[in-house]
Image (cartoon, coloured by chain):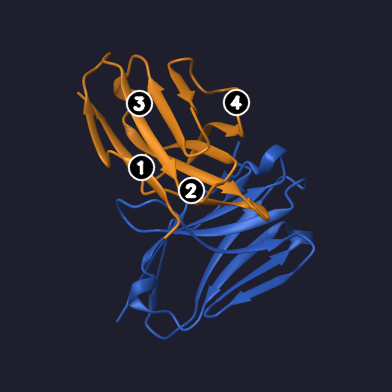
Chain colours: A blue, B orange
């Protein structure tokens, strides 16, 4: 019973183009959403987050969009760079003490 | 730089032989977490400490224990590792003004022979 779903296990994008990673959730109690980036043999690195009271948050090349009515969020990376190649995890919280529920991740490959 | 440190990065143990993984942090965060991540799966929360208060997830096996002797350190003890416990173990912290964002260490890869 996955509460956070990333339905695309992988995504391949050309350098310079936009990467769009998607995430869906089922628990309407979630009120804070995060994206993490993970390189092989390393821990997840915090990338960007969004509160449920907002619908957009931007940080440089990274923008997260939240559509609460659809229980959907997405991460946009533009322009994509080869160094962005990694596994991206969507996570949500809303329970006690901010416990995070993670999706299974999407592996992004940015080709030069 | 403030960070979350995990030692060792790779740990090999034998079936049934107790093993301890360690985590330290210089962020002075009050919450510390332990996650287990198996290949191609989402990280799964095992337990966390809110200051000294221990919070165990309902489905965390009794084989997994934790200790937090002070703010900076947290240990994961696996009393009798089985082959199914081979995984990446991630430590994370949260605290300060933004309690909801967790910061992860590099992880310890556990191999059980």
Residue named by callout 3: B85
- The answer for how far apart the CA atoms under marks 2 and 3 are is 19 Å
Mark sitting earlier along the chain (1/3): 1
> Where is the N terminus of chain B found, in terms of image quarters?
bottom left
Identify the residue shown where x is 35% and y is 42%: B6
Parent chain of label 2: A
Identify the residue shown where x is 35% and y is 31%: B21
Question: Which-is-in-front pick, marks 1 and 2?
Answer: 1
| Mark 3 burial class by Cα count in 10 Å: few <14, some 14-19, many 20+ | some
Q: Whole-percent x and y of residue B111?
A: 25, 31
Are discs 4 and 3 located on one and the same chain? yes
Residue nearer the viewer, A15 or B58: B58
Residue named by callout 2: A104
Parent chain of label 4: B
Q: Secondary structure at mark 1?
A: strand
Q: Which mark is residue A98?
A: none
Q: Is residue B58 above or below residue A58?
A: above
Are discs 2 and 3 located on one and the same chain? no
Q: Quadrant of residue A29?
A: top right
Q: Pointers 4 and 2 in contact (CB under 8 A)?
A: no
Q: Is A36 left, or right, of A3 in this rendering?
A: left
Residue named by callout 1: B6
């Amino acid at each position: 019973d996955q509460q956070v779903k990333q339905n695309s296990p992988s995504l391949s994008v050309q350098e310079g183009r936009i990467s769009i990673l998607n995430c869906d959730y089922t628990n309407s109690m979630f009120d804070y959403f995060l994206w993490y980036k993970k390189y092989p043999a390393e821990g997840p690195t915090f990338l960007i987050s969004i509160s449920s009271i907002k619908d957009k948050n931007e940080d440089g090349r990274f923008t997260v969009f939240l559509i609460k009515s659809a229980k959907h969020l997405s991460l946009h990376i533009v322009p994509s760079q080869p160094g962005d190649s990694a596994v991206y995890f969507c996570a949500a919280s809303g329970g006690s003490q901010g416990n995070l529920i993670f999706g299974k991740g999407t592996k992004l490959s940015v080709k030069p | 730089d403030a960070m979350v440190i995990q030692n060792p990065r790779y740990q090999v143990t034998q079936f049934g032989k107790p093993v301890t993984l360690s985590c330290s942090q210089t962020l002075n965060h009050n919450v510390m977490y332990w996650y287990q991540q198996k290949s191609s799966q989402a990280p799964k929360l095992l337990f966390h400490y809110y200051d000294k208060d221990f919070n165990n997830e309902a489905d965390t096996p009794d084989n997994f224990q934790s200790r937090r002797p002070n703010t900076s350190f947290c240990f994961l003890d696996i009393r009798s590792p089985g082959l199914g416990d081979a995984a990446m173990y991630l430590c994370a912290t949260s605290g300060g003004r933004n309690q909801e964002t967790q910061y992860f260490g590099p992880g310890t890869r556990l191999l059980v022979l």
